[in-house]
Amino acid sequence: MLPATVAELSRVGLLKELPGEKLGEIAKRMDREEVPPGRAVVREGEDSERFYVVLSGLFAVSQEDLGPRRVLHPGNYFGEVGLAMHVPRTASVRALTPAVVASCDRATFDEFVKPLFGH
């Protein structure tokens, strides 16, 4: 697995608040993954283990009770609700196009990303 790059992560609205040094640290800890169209990255109700950012492509967010919710574009992120609140996934996220995500584990999320939601 290739790590994400600082340039890629700096395009993510939430992460661009991080100073360059911290962005470099989180980039090394985020795994890049290619996602074919139609594949679900996370499914509603699953354990929340990772935080994701969209590097390329489009993703559909849906909930069983409410149906389609929105479309995620490069620079968007998902998976923060379950990690921050320690609850199962609140939605499913599926690739609509060939796509690439970068993700990190809970420890990296807690150290670098979670504090950004306090602003």
Image (spheres, rainbow, N blue to C red):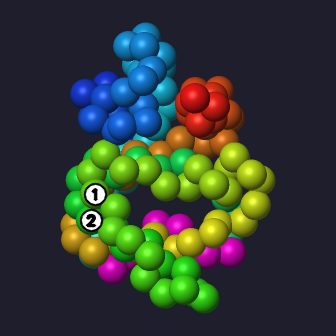
Point 76% across, 61% down: residue: 87
Say which residue label 1 marks: 73
How crowded is the residue under tag 1: few (<14 C-alpha within 10 Å), some, or many (20+)?
Answer: some
Q: Is residue 105 magenta?
A: no
Q: Amino acid at mark 1?
A: His
Q: Which quadrant would the N terminus be assigned to in this image?
A: top left
Say which residue label 2 marks: 58
Numbered circle sitting on residue 23:
none
The mark total stands at 2
Q: Is residue 43 magenta?
A: yes
Residue 50 is situated, as x and y percent measured from the top left of the image, at 59, 50
Q: Amino acid at mark 2?
A: Leu
Q: Is residue 107 visible?
A: yes
Q: What secondary structure do most residues of the magenta stretch adopt? A: loop
Range of magenta residues: 38-45
Point 49% across, 87% down: residue: 67
